[in-house]
Image (cartoon, rainbow, N blue to C red):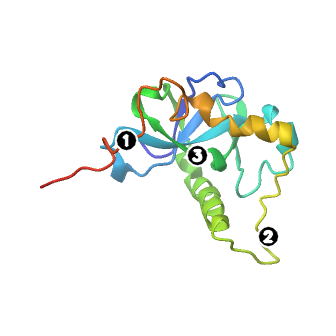
Amino acid sequence: MAQFDVRRNKGPLKESIPFVVVVQSALFDLYRRRMVVPLVRRSALPGLTAAAGSRMNPVFEVEGVPVVLHPPDMVSVAFDQLGEHTTSLAEYGQAIADALDELLTRSWGYNNHHNPASSGINIPSAQGIGFNELTTGLYLVAHQHGKDAVSLDGVVNLHF
């Protein structure tokens, strides 16, 4: 599975999050999990229309569906929980890396007048609660009775 491959979301929120993009480097292909970022259907984010297309939330088209990269919901997913491969966003790899850089740089409080710390996304509390539930819809760690519990298995390989 290559970096920037797009996979179908098999979770219950697949209508609003039809795809995820793999952002993990090929250096970690031997692990059984992949770091993915949700590609949220643009029409499902009416309150985020102004932020869509920003450095942190680039817009792409996958199978004719306009989708917005949503880095704050980046998660680790077991390889067998990912849906089928649809396409690659490798040609937009720099834009995706920039979005992740924006997320991580902001976490350290980087701020100046030309590049404010806020992403510009202002989500009302009811809608914000819904976005906090996005990752659970991807059948991840928070999903009850999940196949892959959080553990060191596959994360740390001890060689004595």
Say whether disc 3 or disc 1 marks the residue closer to the N-terminus.
3
Asked whether the viewer can see residue 126, the reply is: yes
Quarter placement of the C terminus? bottom left
Say whether disc 1 or disc 2 marks the residue closer to the N-terminus.
2
Q: Is residue 115 above or below residue 78?
A: below
Occupied quadrant, residue 97: bottom right
The residue tagged 1 is: 151
What is the spatial separation of the Cα atoms under label 3 and label 1, in whole angstroms?
Answer: 19 Å
The residue tagged 2 is: 116
Estimate the x, y position of residue 71 in percent, counting from the top left: 64, 49
The amino acid marked with disc number 1 is Ser
At 41% from the left and 27% from the top, the residue drawn is 80
Q: Is residue 50 above or below residue 130?
A: below
* Within-10-Å neighbours for mark 2: few <14, some 14–19, many 20+: few
* Within-10-Å neighbours for mark 3: few <14, some 14–19, many 20+: some
What is the spatial separation of the Cα atoms under label 3 and label 2, in whole angstroms?
Answer: 22 Å
The residue tagged 3 is: 74
Estimate the x, y position of residue 88 in percent, counting from the top left: 52, 39
Disc 2 element: loop
98 left or right of 160 in image? right
Estimate the x, y position of residue 132 in percent, counting from the top left: 70, 40
Asked whether the viewer can see residue 1, the reply is: no
The amino acid marked with disc number 2 is Pro
Q: Nearer the viewer, residue 107 or 82?
A: 107
Quarter placement of the N terminus? top left
At 62% from the left and 28% from the top, the residue drawn is 137
